[in-house]
Image (cartoon, rainbow, N blue to C red):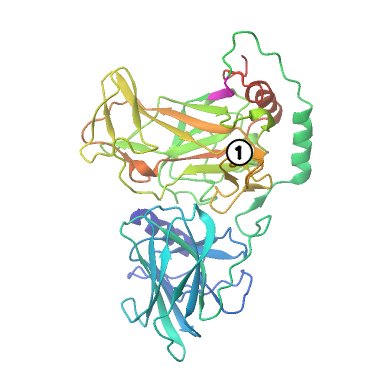
Amino acid sequence: MKKRRRRTRIVLATAVTAALGASGVYIAGASADETTVAGRLQAESYAAQSGAQTEGTGDADGGKNVGWLADGDWLRFDAVAVAGTALSARVASDNSAGGSIEMHLGSQTGTLLATFPVARTGGWQSWTTVTATANSVPSGPQTVFAVMKSAQKSDFVNINWFTFGGAAAPAPAPSVPTGDGWVPVDKAKWDKQLAEYDATVAKPVPAGNVRVPEFNASCKVSHRLPDDPIVFPGMAGASHLHTFMGNKSTSAASTNASLFANLETSCDPKEDRSAYWIPTLLENGKPVDPHGVTVYYGSRLKDPTKTVPFPEGFRMITGDAKKQVATGKGAPAQFWCAGAGGETGRSADGNWPVCAKTAELTYQLTFPDCWDGVHLDSPDHKSHVGPTGPDGTCASGRFPVAIPSISFVIGYPTSGSSAGFQLSSGMASSMHGDFMNAWETKPLAQRVRDCVTQKAKCDSAGTF
């Protein structure tokens, strides 16, 4: 994980013409694109840092936040006025291990000013304000180090801002987030697409059909590249290695328009020119391509009748490339063995199954099926979608629009061994998937109407 963060920092530093010395400490100036609030110190206004990156924030005050922060990383702030004992920090985390942010005076190990607790907030862009009480109130301007502390080595916190002595001033959550990374849907285009969908007439479901809401795209591997057009758009080679399915043109330069312009896909049906990708699986250091990936479109809601197709240009990610934790037998969201004989043991490190020779390594990735109805994408590529509401529908939660639930079922032609495997993103826990929608709108609309809203099992051709 450290290797990935260092590599990314170098790429970003080059992009902003910053200096990265042999010490590994990145020197940067303050950003001025956030909303200014009296008494608030933006996290990206550090004078120096180790291990951090900035990104457009999903928090209400816009601008940027600082992320990719793990145990031992730090931020240095100069000329800080500590005006009182009441300190606050705006944080987000999707790491259940959590940790703390220690505020030291003068150096990374200097006098401890205060400690902010960090617990999981529900997402890397799900923000909350935490408070701390200063041990003292030093006079005059101070150099303050924010030092990350956690019992594990994975990234565990994003930081948006601090206050030093004034009342905490949390940003009120707006009804519609805006700012860098939030990509609004074209309302006129979306209204037209919805009108066309509403006009779609469902085909009768034949007797004997299996009544589950489902259709699929049957995909083969297209290619591998160290690219990610969602996380690192336009930055060829900036990512860990990915295995791509679907649109054969997918690269760091891909856009919705470029995907639609390319007719070649490794998926059936051909009306689906979407791009799908996952981190590359490595066995003994060599890539292992899936023999096939079935992309299921369905619904996990109590009532799927309100489901609508994805808007043009929609994209999202599921899973967490930053998550580096053990995944022993019985752990959720793990690799498993499909086929006769199933799992016969575990790898030496306990993180991978060893399958019978008649079985193979398998994984299933599932995306959310509720959408905010406003954004095609969000800063973390997750915050515009979410889980169902408390009553089992989308309408009762923060994400009121029901969309098809996508699920990748990935089969690898290997049974594994005690040596286990590795993902290009790290441990088994870092498995994740990306989706850029490039379905032709009418074929997608017909499948959602026939198969999902009628709870009818369909094949890749969209037939019962």
The residue where tag 1 is placed is 391
Nearest the viewer among 106 and 372 is: 372
Is 450 placed left or right of 232 in the picture?
A: right
- What residue appears at the point 54 percent right and 50 percent down from the top-left corner? 233
Expressed as whole percent of the image width and height from the top left, the position of residue 148 reads 37, 66
Expressed as whole percent of the image width and height from the top left, the position of residue 238 reads 45, 51
Q: Is residue 148 above or below residue 418?
A: below
The reply to whether residue 247 is in sight is no
- What residue appears at the point 65 percent right and 41 percent down from the top-left corner? 313
Highlighted range, magenta: 212-217
Q: Residue 219 lies in magenta, yes or no?
A: no
Q: Quadrant of the C terminus?
A: top right
Expressed as whole percent of the image width and height from the top left, the position of residue 97 reads 36, 54
- What residue appears at the point 39 percent right and 57 percent down from the top-left corner? 155
- What residue appears at the point 61 percent right and 40 percent down from the top-left corner? 370
SS state under label 1: loop
Nearest the viewer among 246 and 258 is: 246
Instruction: Kindly report the secondary structure that dominates the magenta region of the rendered protein.
Output: strand
Expressed as whole percent of the image width and height from the top left, the position of residue 421 reads 29, 37
The reply to whether residue 195 is in sight is yes
Nearest the viewer among 131 and 403 is: 131
- Numbered label tally: 1
> Which quadrant of the view contains residue 268?
top right
The amino acid pointed to by label 1 is Asp
